[in-house]
Image: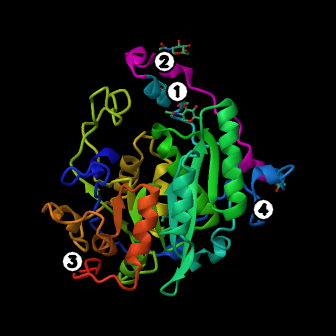
Amino acid sequence: MKGLHVIHFYGVGIFGLFVVYLCKIHINSKLDNFYVYVKGKGNIPTSSHTSRSHQTKPVTINDSYVYSWPKCEQNTSAANITDFSSLPGHIQDFLYYRHCRHFPMLLDVPDKCGGASQSAEVFLLLVIKSSPVNYDRREVLRKTWAEEREQNGVWIRRLFISGTMESGKEKQRLNKLLELEHREHNDILQWDFSDSFFNLTLKQILFLEWMERNCPNARFLLNGDDDVFANTDNMIQYLQGLEDNDGSKHLYAGFVFENTAPVRYTLSKYFVPVQVQESESYPPYCGGGGFLLSGYSAMVINNMSQSITLFPIDDVYMGMCLAKAGLGPVSHMGVKTIGLTIHSGNIDEHDPCYYKELLLVHRFFPAHMYLMWHRIHDPSLVCGIRNVIQNKP
Ligand SMILES: *[C@@H]1O[C@H](CO)[C@@H](O)[C@H](O)[C@H]1NC(C)=O
Ligand SMILES: *[C@@H]1O[C@H](CO)[C@@H](O)[C@H](O)[C@H]1NC(C)=O
Ligand SMILES: *[C@@H]1O[C@H](CO)[C@@H](O)[C@H](O)[C@H]1NC(C)=O
Ligand SMILES: *[C@@H]1O[C@H](CO)[C@@H](O)[C@H](O)[C@H]1NC(C)=O
Ligand SMILES: *[C@@H]1O[C@H](CO)[C@@H](O)[C@H](O)[C@H]1NC(C)=O
């Protein structure tokens, strides 16, 4: 329900604030009994620049599992659903393809985490949903908060997850663009499905499956959009400060929505008709603009997802998967709603001191992102605000 994340303050339309509340619950489970579900796959290519276009053919027969899934056919019986013909086109489309969970991979980085067995070395994996057209956002993220680096003694790694655009010439052009970026930066996972709003859940579950294969022991993930400002320095500090900071306990932290229900208003972007979900309530979930997950919780979602029908709103679906495992987001007031207090007309909404203290803010234009990242790192910046990211209940 991304539209709800954006809280505009005193009429500054483009500069909505998204403030992260932190929430966590503990359950006693260990990361070391992860089950790596490989579905009959053999060796995966380990070259660091593996993309389909660089390979004349798949390296082993079983790589075709990942790189050339057969086309998933539409379920024509979906048209028998009551009042199907009166539903908006994108919903009809969703229902026709709801059963499709696998698409061929076009770009892959199987060794992003140094191989599955080394993946515990990755402390924070940034998993950023990005449509092929968002070149400028990816470029600025690579230079700012999503830069791969060692921060406070631990590693941050970055992946953009993408589908494809439309069809024909434009699709080819954009695929070529992603391929060029990938060749230079080695940071894109792309699958051959249409990168639409109602396919975001698909993108998420394809990523989780990739993670299970290639990066099962990453400690934490930041999963979010390519237009958020994430203070990854603060995230590392927050995550390192957790009592259990090895990713083996449940953590699902973000802006929590509770007691929400499907939007039944046809013209809304979030419209979900009863033909897609009858129930009048959603489980609690973290807004999809940006949330933190432990490696453990990511694997729980992946496991639960196998038996939960796809639901088009991706952040709600994450909540559904965790709810099935008896888990959810629990508010943890480690972060105050500091941004929300910015409404006394004389405060500058571009003041870096606000962003220095937050974990994540929705939504930023690339130029603002670049500027703000530099301003919060300016050694001469003096801020009087107390540190709000400490993990204190
Ligand atoms: C591919 O996977 C299948 C099913 O797991 C297995 O029987 C077969 O031997 C594998 N082939 C190769 C070439 O690894
Ligand atoms: C549902 O659709 C299929 C394929 O279009 C059709 O063959 C079948 O008769 C329909 N079933 C019902 C119950 O209407
Ligand atoms: C196709 O759609 C019908 C009607 O919604 C549904 O009952 C059936 O399970 C679907 N088939 C698959 C393979 O998902
Ligand atoms: C999701 O992607 C598939 C494959 O490209 C496409 O057939 C389907 O229409 C898309 N669904 C939606 C709701 O956009
Ligand atoms: C996922 O499922 C596998 C197989 O059912 C199980 O062994 C593993 O413990 C599960 N992992 C999590 C994190 O739930």
Q: Quadrant of residue 335?
A: bottom left
- Looking at the figure, which quarter contains the C terminus? bottom left
Residue at position x 54%, y 53% in the image: 136
Q: Which residue is mark 4?
A: 45
Q: Are marks 2 and 1 in contact (CB under 8 Å)?
A: yes
* Displayed quadrant of residue 380: bottom left
Looking at the image, residue 341 lies above or below residue 83: below
First in sequence, mark 4 or 3: give its number. 4
- Residue nearest the viewer, comparing 40 with 364: 364
Specify the amino acid type for callout 3. Answer: Pro
Q: Which mark is residue 79?
A: 2
Element under label 1? helix
In this view, which residue lies farthest toward the left? 344
The disc labelled 1 sits on which kind of residue? Tyr
Q: Which residues are magenta?
A: 62-88
Q: Is residue 280 magenta?
A: no
- Density class for disc 1 (Cα within 10 Å; few <14, some 14-19, many ≥20) is some
- The answer to whether mark 3 and mark 2 are in CB contact below 8 A is no
Q: In the rendering, at what x and y percent does residue 166 appear? A: 60, 33
Q: Which mark is residue 141?
A: none
Crowd rating for badge 4 (residues with CA inside 10 Å; few <14, some 14–19, many 20+): some
Mark 4 vs mark 1, CA separation in Å: 33 Å
Give the mark nearer the N terminus: 4 vs 1. Answer: 4
Secondary element at image label 3:
loop
Residue ranking furthest to the bottom: 153
